[in-house]
Image: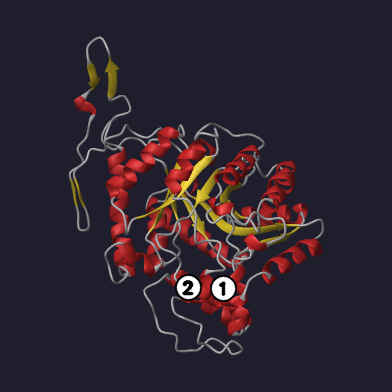
Amino acid sequence: MPERKTLHLTAFMRPVSLHSGAWRYPGSYPDANFNLAHLKSFIQKLEAAKFDAFFMADHLAVLNMPVEALKRSHTVTSFEPFTLLSALSQVTEKIGLAATASTTYDEPYHIARRFASLDHLSNGRAAWNIVTTGNPESAKNFGLDEHVEHSERYKRAREFYDVVTGLWDSFADDAFIRNQESGIYLDPEKMHVLNHRGDELKVRGPLNIARPVQGWPVIVQAGQSEPGRQLAAETAEVVFCSPRDLESAKSLYADIKGRAAAAGRSGETLKILPAALIVVGDTVEDAKNKRLKLDSLVHYDSAIASLSISLGTDASGFDPDAPLPADIPDTNASKTSRAGVLKLAEDEKLTVRQLAGRYGGYSGLAFVGTPETIAQDMEVWLNEEAADGFTVCFPFLPQGLDDVTERLVPELQRRGLFRKDYEGTTLREHLGLARPKNQFFT
């Protein structure tokens, strides 16, 4: 008999909750995004529950929303991912440490060096979430007046990946002899100078750090547009995505896995982990009431600002009690996010006010119920090839996280759907991924 499939679970932790009302929920920590003691406790609870990884998104600008909305947002301040994950690597032993790093507003040598360092500091637990940066405001923090065009961002990202992975392979695994008697520290025959000259990038190398413990840190990709899917199929080992329902998730899963196969890759080398808000209650009705309470804490100023970000255009002037205008101009922001807004508005015939309320809190996939009903739903997604697991988003912290680690995870374990202990010590081992061979040395 084939081995039973099991779930992979990562925790979305920057911001600590994607729901904009999370910091106001009774009993929550309002400073959770920027409090090291809280974050240390969160990651240790997640490691005790055997989560695959602690996943940090990142922003390179304060979110482009009106001040009246910004003053209500809990995402204004948070730690820079590498600094925080380096600190958290020293108070954990096995949980993976995933950070977002932009290919648009950084350089390959920086990215390769930072992730190699994190992989060594954590003994093989680092992961790079490749993004091209969707927020147009970021450009203004890097000497540009306009955001880089969408297709150009992805063209650079593809070449960027080749350069970073090439830099990680600068040295053979046994290049550093460190023989005190002979005085030989490095075998120069086992050092590769990349000398990359491409359409977008020019990088000599080699990287001035030993090859990462995992060979390469795990590659995560978070785009769902046409070029994003292709980039994932060619490069990613984990895909962070946001389908709204089972059928759209199955379609996305089949599309990306099919593209990977066309690129000569096995589906087992690619784990698709949709984002899912999880609200656990004593009964389904109790869980629904928690969600309603949470949604009620979102102010309209924040809600309409969130809708504006998702659309890529200012929605504050739209009639709140009318449908979305039909003539919203195209923009250079995230195509996937905008398409999702338009589809939701059409499918559910929502007014601007209703749509803003949904986007102001959390508009994506949610499992709201008891540990038993949520575990059953997750098993359906796994068995119907809609997901290989989930990127768990918590509704509020600490209680929402505790509900998942102390109530849902044991139910998943009871059903044989989730590990009771780690299979190894590196993130690649948790995910069942092979250590890549060095491109330049056997």
- Badge 1 marks a residue whose secondary structure is helix
Where residue 222 appears, x then y in whole percent? 45, 58
Q: Badge 1: how crowded within 10 Å, few (<14), some, or many (20+)?
A: many
Q: Which amino acid, mark 1?
A: Ser
Indicate which disc residue 302 carries: 1
User: Is 311 left or right of 146, judged from the image as shown?
Assistant: right
Q: Quadrant of the C terminus?
A: top left
Q: Nearer the viewer, residue 96 or 340?
A: 96
User: Is 3 left or right of 144, judged from the image as shown?
Assistant: right
Q: Which amino acid, mark 2?
A: Met
- Badge 2 marks a residue whose secondary structure is loop
Q: Residue at x 49, y 54 (%)?
A: 78
Q: Badge 2: how crowded within 10 Å, few (<14), some, or many (20+)?
A: some
Q: Residue at x 53, y 64 (%)?
A: 251
Identify whether 282 is placed above or below 423. Answer: below
Question: Residue 176: which quarter of the image?
Answer: top left
Residue marked by disc 2: 65
